[in-house]
Image (spheres, coloured by chain):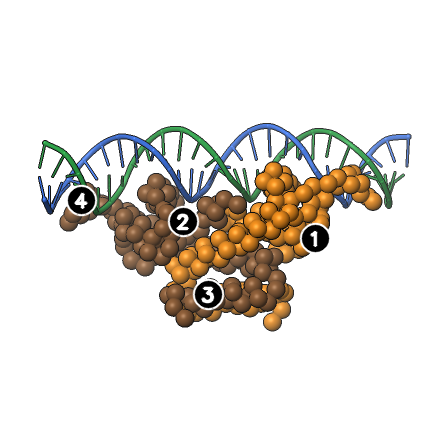
Chain colours: A orange, B brown, C blue, D green
DNA sequence: ATTTTCTACTTGGTATTGCAAAGTAGTATG
DNA sequence: CATACTACTTTGCAATACCAAGTAGAAAAT
């Protein structure tokens, strides 16, 4: 029932995926996640994820001064991180496949699901 | 990284959805989940979910003797449970939409994702 | 000059939930 | 009587999202 539970694990994969697209830092990741629809995301949710990714060796972290504000920590993905991202995506697809089989049995619901993917990159029709 | 995290919340929705299809009991739900691909699911995972669904008023529970083995607890969905199931499905779709936007940006990956849904009910092509 | 505002990261505590492990019990089969 | 299968319970643990509060630098406003 708690929607936040549905995010478990997904968020970490999304953050890793964003870092995979190019070196970036926490605050920028946060604003990007918000732009993509994860609007109620707090800093206390994101920063622990970055720490975890670093501890696991999936990202590299370097500190650099910001043109405005305090020091930034820039993150970039490692080879290990790339491997893990692929494995995450596969696990994500597998679980979705199983869940969809149970949740969306009739054609109408399946159509709605397909739209979710076909819209893809942007929200327009 | 932990795959089990991806299950969080999804499982409860799936269990509620199975009960929505007709009155059933724990052990049968478990075997059905296993048949659908959730193979490593233990009893210690399922039964607490059933207790939670009952506490929240999403299911009704009645005890009845089994033709073989000890007493069964049969579960059926309530109106409140049906409402919640719909809300769950919507939340699930919304989160998937957001995550897919970030994870599957290129066309090849999107194609792979679509197959997951188009296969739908069974695994054959 | 002081306050406010925006950027940027940290820390501590809580609740939810999946999961492993062990236990309790009833019935049937050998 | 022992074993196996069915069926539910309980306890404890680990991972993680999230809230709240704190630390800090730099620029803009008063």
Secondary element at tag 4: loop
Task: Same chain for labels 1 and 4? Say yes or no.
Answer: no
Instruction: Give the foreground label among 4 and 2.
Output: 4
Q: Which residue is mark 1?
A: A22
Question: What chain is tagged by disc 2?
Answer: B
Q: Residue at x 27, y 55 (%)?
A: B23
Give the CA separation, mark 3 to mark 2.
Answer: 21 Å
Q: Give the numbered dot on residue B123.
A: none
Chain-order first, disc 3 or disc 2: 2
Question: What chain is tagged by disc 1?
Answer: A
Q: Position of residue A109 (x, y in %)?
A: 44, 66
Instruction: Give the foreground label among 2 and 1.
Output: 1
**A87 is higher (above) or lower (below) than B107:** above
Q: Pick out the residue farthest to the front.
A: A79
Q: Which residue is mark 2?
A: B12
Whether the residues at callouts 3 and 2 have beta carbons within 8 Å, the answer is no
Q: Which residue is mark 4?
A: B69
Q: Residue at x 19, y 47 (%)?
A: B64
């Amino acid at each position: 029932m708690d929607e936040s539970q549905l995010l478990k694990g997904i968020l970490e994969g999304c953050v890793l995926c964003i870092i995979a697209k190019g070196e970036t830092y926490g605050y920028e990741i946060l604003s990007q996640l918000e732009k993509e629809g994860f609007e109620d995301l707090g800093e206390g949710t994101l920063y622990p994820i970055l720490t975890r990714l670093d501890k696991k060796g999936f990202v590299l972290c370097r500190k650099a001064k910001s043109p405005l504000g305090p020091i930034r920590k820039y993150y970039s993905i490692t080879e290990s991180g790339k491997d893990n991202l692929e494995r995450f995506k596969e696990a994500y697809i597998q679980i979705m496949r199983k869940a969809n089989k149970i949740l969306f049995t009739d054609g109408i619901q399946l159509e709605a699901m397909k739209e979710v993917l076909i819209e893809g990159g942007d929200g327009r029709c």
